Amino acid sequence: MLKLKSMNKFSLAKTNIFLFKDFSQAALQSSCNFCSKSLLISGRRLYSLLGLSSLMRGAPEQTRLILLREDGEKCKSFGCVETVLKEALEFDLGRNDRIVAAGGGSLTDLGAFCASIYKRGSRLTLVPTTLLAMIDAAVGGKTAVNVGGFKNCAGTFYPASEIIICPDFLKTLPVKEIENGLFEAVKYGVLFSKALLKKIFENQPLLKKYRPQNGREKYGAGVHASNAALFFDIIKNCVNFKMRIVKKDPFDKNERLALNFGHTFGHAFESVSGGSVSHGAAVGLGMAAELIFSRFKHGESGDNAELVSKIMSFIRATSHYRVLDDFLAAPEIFARMRKYILNDKKALPEGYIEMPLVKKAGLYEIEKISLREELEPFLNSPHYLLDEWREGTRLIRRGAK
């Protein structure tokens, strides 16, 4: 078990983040929390698939379980919020008792939001079970639900008492879900670490599926050694990068805005797609689009162009590529993105939006972008992105012949 340094995120509290190599250790740590009343929120399928009953070792009268039918973005709704709060009231959960949310990023967002508003704030433990949640969504104190098709439109800043991370949860994840998390890991590499970025790009074929450290197991047509140490290292690095930024800027006013790289366009892509494009894939495409926008604004850059090429190559090697290719072939995508960007939480009332513009790996600057004079001309000229995307697609099809 590795206990990462406590993160004094807010003046209100601090979060202890535990990174375990073994599920039994994670379950033991979680069970220590059930000395007071605890309400565990998870998904029906997830609860049985991952054996999350181990997280509820307290006395039966001290614990209650909520298994939601909804999963993914569907659970980030006020309907699910009401379900959780009513159950908490019926259970007579006090503000010094604990809400535990175990699941992917959407579920930890929901659980954290509920904890932040229940009796003006109950104790909170997060147990992220997807790669994306482990390295990004569950870390940093942001909570959110969606409203009217707009992502994260309602939310709070609320620190968890602790976050319990165990990569062994990843062994049940399909390839697409692993890749969703890797897109966020690429973001951290682009912003903060060329070494991390190189590690992810060079090991992409080995990161398709999590293989535990207890020996070797079958994967595809062959047998592969464990890659648990590689995943552990990527998770640890990403969490530490995020902790460092959040400690400096807990409320998303300055340095933390850098973590929105890929998300301004990514959230718009995700919303326009109606859910057919996953969050991670949307962020991957969003990173490429925002890099190209940086060139559109500041002029050509060889370093920038090389980074776009590498990110697009990474996307094409994922299982999300065909969905994204079909999505980009649909009409009026960029015109429809406008309303989502205008309603982005980073948009300012005077007609600007704050975005991190990356010039090359490790070099970025947070800039105020004029929605009318800079972003709209770019959105009205989709060929900047589509030409680079199609060039790679032509190369793939030519190689397949």
Image: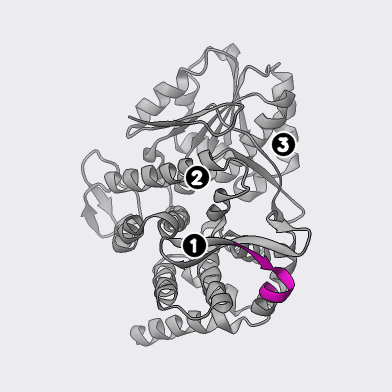
Secondary element under disc 3, as helix, strand or loop, is helix
Report how far apart the C-alphas of labels 1 and 3 lie in the structure: 37 Å
Amino acid marked by disc 1? Tyr
**Residue at horizontal 62%, vertical 42%?**
251
Q: Position of residue 160 (x, y in %)?
A: 56, 30
Q: Position of residue 199 (x, y in %)?
A: 30, 57
- Location of the N terminus by quadrant is top left
Q: Position of residue 24 (x, y in %)?
A: 36, 27
User: Quick one: label 1 or label 3, which is nearer the N terminus?
Assistant: 3
**Total numbered circles:** 3
Q: Can the viewer see residue 12 in this picture?
A: yes
Task: Answer with left or right where residue 237 lies relative to residue 252.
Answer: left
Amino acid marked by disc 3? Val
Amino acid marked by disc 2? Ile
What residue is pinned by disc 1? Answer: 364
Q: Is residue 158 above or below residue 216?
A: above
Residue nearest the viewer, comparing 188 with 19: 188
Residue 369 on the magenta span = yes
Report how far apart the C-alphas of labels 1 and 2 lie in the structure: 14 Å
Task: Answer with left or right where residue 28 lies relative to residue 70.
Answer: left
User: Quick one: label 3 or label 2, which is nearer the N terminus?
Assistant: 3
What residue is pinned by disc 2? Answer: 245
User: Quick one: label 3, few (<14), some, or many (20+) residues within 10 Å?
Assistant: many
Q: Which stretch is magenta?
A: 367-375
Q: Is residue 195 above or below residue 381?
A: above
Looking at the picture, the colour scheme in use is one colour
What residue is pinned by disc 3? Answer: 81
